[in-house]
Amino acid sequence: NVQQKTGSKATDAETFDYAFTNVKVDPSVGDIVSGSATFATKGATPSGTWNYSGTITFLGNHQAKIVINGTTYTVDLQTGTVS
């Protein structure tokens, strides 16, 4: 939760929960090569509200499969490109 200390700005309420399982990093390249995570996030800000949950499966070679509320994305973790 974020509350402004000065002025009359609005309050934010946000949560971000992650649970990682068997995540392995190749230290020679600094890449996550395998493992997974589950996540849940929700919040309310002056800009809007959200409520998302899903999984991240690390595929190696800077790639991850991310499922958010049932929709699947493949992401290049170096460039941010989504397909």
Image: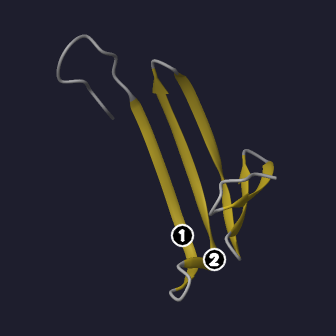
Residue 25, horizontal then vertical, whole percent? 55, 82
| Image-quadrant location for residue 77 | bottom right
Q: Which residue is mark 2?
A: 35
Left/right placement of residue 55 relative to residue 74 reads left
Rendered position, 66 above or below 61? above
Q: Which amino acid, mark 2? A: Gly
> Contact (CB < 8 A) between labels 2 and 1?
yes
- For residue 57, the mark is none
Residue 61 sits above or below residue 7 on the image: below
Q: Residue at image x 65%, y 58%?
A: 79
Q: Residue at coordinates 63% horizontally, 47% vertically from top-left?
A: 53
Against 33, residue 28 (above or below) is: below
Q: Position of residue 63 (x, y in %)?
A: 71, 68
Q: Gap between marks 2 and 1, in whole Å?
A: 8 Å
Which residue is denoted by mark 1 in the rendering?
20
Nearest to the observer: residue 56 or residue 60: 60
| Residue found farthest to the top | 8
- The answer to which quarter of the image holds residue 62 is bottom right
Q: Is the N terminus in the top left, top right, bottom left or bottom right quadrant? A: top left
Left or right relative to 29: residue 2: left
Residue depicted at 72% across the width and 58% down the height? 75
